[in-house]
Image: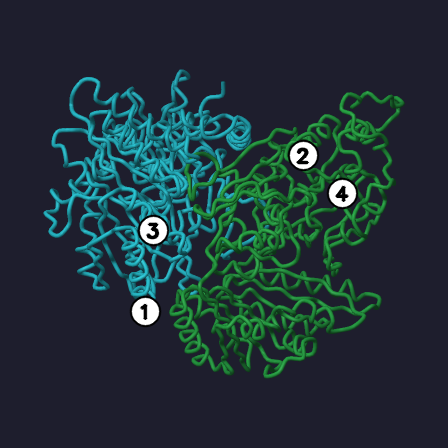
Chain colours: A green, B cyan
Amino acid sequence: MRHVPPALPCWQASGPLDGTGHRLYAGSPPDRAAEGTTALPETAKPIERLATALAPHFGDRLTANSVVREQHSHGEGWRSPDATLQPELVIFAETTNEVARVLRECSTRGIAVTAFGGGTSLEGQTTPLRGGVSLDLSRMTRVIEMRPEDMTCRVEAGVTRQALNHDLRDMGLFFAVDPGGEATIGGMCATRASGTGAVRYGTIAENVSGLTVVTVDGRVLRTGGSVRKSSTGYDLTHLFIGSEGTLGIITEIQLRLHGIPESVVGATCQFETLSDAIDTAVMVMQSGLPVGRMEFLDEVQMDACIRYSKLDGLRALPSLFFEFHGTPTATREQAETVRAIVDDNRGFDFRWSASEAERLALWKARHAAYFAGTAYRPGWSCMTTDAIVPISRLTELMTGAKADIAASGLVAPILGHVGDGNFHTLILYPPEPGAYERAVALDHQIIARALALGGSASGEHGIGMAKQMFMTREHDANALDVMRAIKAALDPANLLNPGKLLPPAD
Amino acid sequence: MRHVPPALPCWQASGPLDGTGHRLYAGSPPDRAAEGTTALPETAKPIERLATALAPHFGDRLTANSVVREQHSHGEGWRSPDATLQPELVIFAETTNEVARVLRECSTRGIAVTAFGGGTSLEGQTTPLRGGVSLDLSRMTRVIEMRPEDMTCRVEAGVTRQALNHDLRDMGLFFAVDPGGEATIGGMCATRASGTGAVRYGTIAENVSGLTVVTVDGRVLRTGGSVRKSSTGYDLTHLFIGSEGTLGIITEIQLRLHGIPESVVGATCQFETLSDAIDTAVMVMQSGLPVGRMEFLDEVQMDACIRYSKLDGLRALPSLFFEFHGTPTATREQAETVRAIVDDNRGFDFRWSASEAERLALWKARHAAYFAGTAYRPGWSCMTTDAIVPISRLTELMTGAKADIAASGLVAPILGHVGDGNFHTLILYPPEPGAYERAVALDHQIIARALALGGSASGEHGIGMAKQMFMTREHDANALDVMRAIKAALDPANLLNPGKLLPPAD
């Protein structure tokens, strides 16, 4: 499960789509009058009838090209052992109305639809388990409305964090959710993503105030709005966030923005022991300091980073990386307060800087952590994991996880969004029989530890296929029944990303 | 609609229940063996059968006393013109299992159940439109678990903010949602409440990470948990928050707590014009300052406060009240930054203090605003309103609202959680024919203005009965259909607070 991905979104990895053929159905130029009228043999399958109906409109944005289908058969991370699990058709939608049209046509024909964004989800969310259509929203990249005065904007689902923050920079604003990679904002919503900034700015759930969603039968609805709060009706916004395309397809998002801080201070420090580092993080959280980011790297991860980035002045020891956001006075004061907490916990080599260049140099190890990890054992494969516990249980979880890692004989650098209690390892396993299975077993051991400590099986990667077996361990049967009742109410024929998120009922 | 309430929760207003009789059904002392076996005539109504079944267990916590039933026929604010709308039975539950049992027994008999907490909701949420049972949770006042190290605790639904903060004080923590009044935390969840602290700490939705909920058929489920974030499954926590007891009954809440700030600075300033005051608030928000509270009082509200509290040094002019939370250095810096923004917007008399006594004196007008408003026209009645817009539209909303107020011939002090764009008036109307109808018309005019400006019909009071007509204006038909589908899935026989929140389908 959760193999390491190519660095590019999957559909870009083989170059842009060029419309030079390979399309099974879209043979003629757009001609709305002809839609649905092409003669098909009576034995034509529903998917063929769908393609015939939609091809005149979508042209070469509707394709059964085998390369494109393969690209849309998985995200990053988890892959099905069954390589034949592919969409029968990939459709690139460019507007909400196009999404509605595809859903309407699929719904009437009983064809499954799986949404696809940046292709960066980690738990198999985008694999179309029942074939059908992979509906790619990555070309929906418009910023629909920008309202700096209200610190909000409305974007289409295919906009990425990087593209949006580029647009926002001149307004002194930024979008704070940073899961890493080239994820789309629609995809972040679908998987309830977060990242290093969540400790200060919250997850995607706290940074979205409204959505446009298309239901399985092609109806378009708006949830929430652009106000900062509201108490009028059921909170559909948060119901669709994290639902992984199983309840509806998110096409637009109303985002909360934040002011770019006047001053950003970076800091690093090191510890002889894991528990000193974690105790420091716990005390920083309890102090109420509005820390901007706080990341933990264990000694294995630090060793990997030092080798990868040729770092001076850092040792292969448990380390914390901080950012403080605010006014120059406030960030300096926060850095000094944290230095005192670090000292109290036997930390050392506390360095900080308000200069952007120095801050980036200080954070170089953290920024390269993922690639340093993957390069740590050349020729080995790797698997990312995700678990979360209440922060007071983090030392216990990490100590236990390190014992599990040692017993497994594998190598697994640890990295954590430690202010949230969120914990990742990158399990490295050699190219030998049984190693993959040992990696999976280690991943499951760590998640089981997190659940036993009152935690959750996924802090920010979602469920997809790869974590379904933990749903019954984390949620009680009645809660799962309510989730199933909602799924049945909104998608009675089970056409939206079927087989995902909810485990089969007994 | 939304008449002014007694200051005490309704069921306390006539003294404690003493179990001295007036119970129609609970004739014998608790005797579990006898439950359900009492002989009833075949013509007995379902509610009589229910009472007979439950009386042995609940004793005098199950009552049909007419005074208690009347107390449970309304919250504060809105009251039905039909005074016969009362529960047939009031049951005081003390545990989640008791709630489950009541729901199970009601469900099998087709009896409606309306939850009741502090009795402070404003839009008619607690009025049992179809009679049945009013299920009072106000005696569920246990703090179940206190975890200061994780800045979280778990409480029963009947715990109030005041009681909880009393318990938390020695740990240096506090619960930040403050809707005013003696609301229970379960009730705050049910109505998605917020208040003056929301600008910094969020609404109840951002301060709850998990719930225990009882479904209509008496099954108990847990949502969320004690971790700071999770991406495992549908977000049932936020689905139940704001659902006003129509999808399930919330019996326990996992809360996020905050550190009591080391320093709290209070400040006030005044302006010649409304627009200068609102522009100041907008600029403070855009500056990214983490302001703790920011409240607006218009010249009418200030006049009422000055008369009521005999204030010196304040004039009947538009005014802003601030709190800054943080370290002494940070709060002082924030106060100075805000003073500069106030100066830029022609504000004056900026006063601030870090001393608790002086801060309370500065904020005296704001703290007494509600009672000052109600006392402003002796003998008149009053009606609270609630609307919210994107903050950039607040000046336009308030200017329009003041024109509406002038045209109405009524008196209506304005008060706003201005950092959120949230706006309240207290409409005062004389005891004369037609005045109540004019007040209602004014309320509706203001809400219509908010909706036309891209706002919401309720920032924090919810929908209940009083605001149902705005649901179809704020939400599109497809969104309402999805809400109805969820209601039908979770409460197919429409027994949970029937008739509330969702307007009837066409």
In three-dimensional space, the C-alpha distance between marks 4 and 3, rounded to whole angstroms, equals: 46 Å
Q: Nearer the viewer, mark 4 or mark 1?
A: 1
Q: Residue at x 46, y 21 (%)?
A: B504
Q: Residue at x 54, y 32 (%)?
A: B486
Horizontal arrangement in the rendering, residue B147 relative to residue A254 (left or right): left
CB-based contact (under 8 Å), mark 2 and mark 3: no
Same chain under badges 2 and 4? The reply is yes
Query: Residue B296 in the image: x percent, y percent?
Result: 27, 45
Q: Nearer the viewer, mark 2 or mark 3?
A: 2
- The amino acid type, in three-letter code, at marker 1 is Thr
Helix or strand or loop: what does disc 3 sit on? loop
In three-dimensional space, the C-alpha distance between marks 2 and 4, rounded to whole angstroms, equals: 20 Å
Q: Which residue is mark 1?
A: B329
- The amino acid type, in three-letter code, at marker 4 is Leu
Q: Earlier in the sequence, mark 3 or mark 1?
A: 3
Same chain under badges 3 and 1? The reply is yes
- Of residues A1 and A35, the one drawn nearer to the viewer in this rendering: A35
Q: Nearer the viewer, mark 4 or mark 3?
A: 3
- The amino acid type, in three-letter code, at marker 2 is Val
Q: Chain of mark 1?
A: B
Helix or strand or loop: what does disc 1 sit on? helix
Query: Residue A148 in the image: x percent, y percent?
Result: 47, 48
Same chain under badges 4 and 3? The reply is no
Q: Which residue is mark 2?
A: A99
Query: Residue A421 in the image: x percent, y percent?
Result: 53, 63
Looking at the picture, does residue A449 appear above or below residue A145? Answer: below
Q: Which residue is mark 3?
A: B197
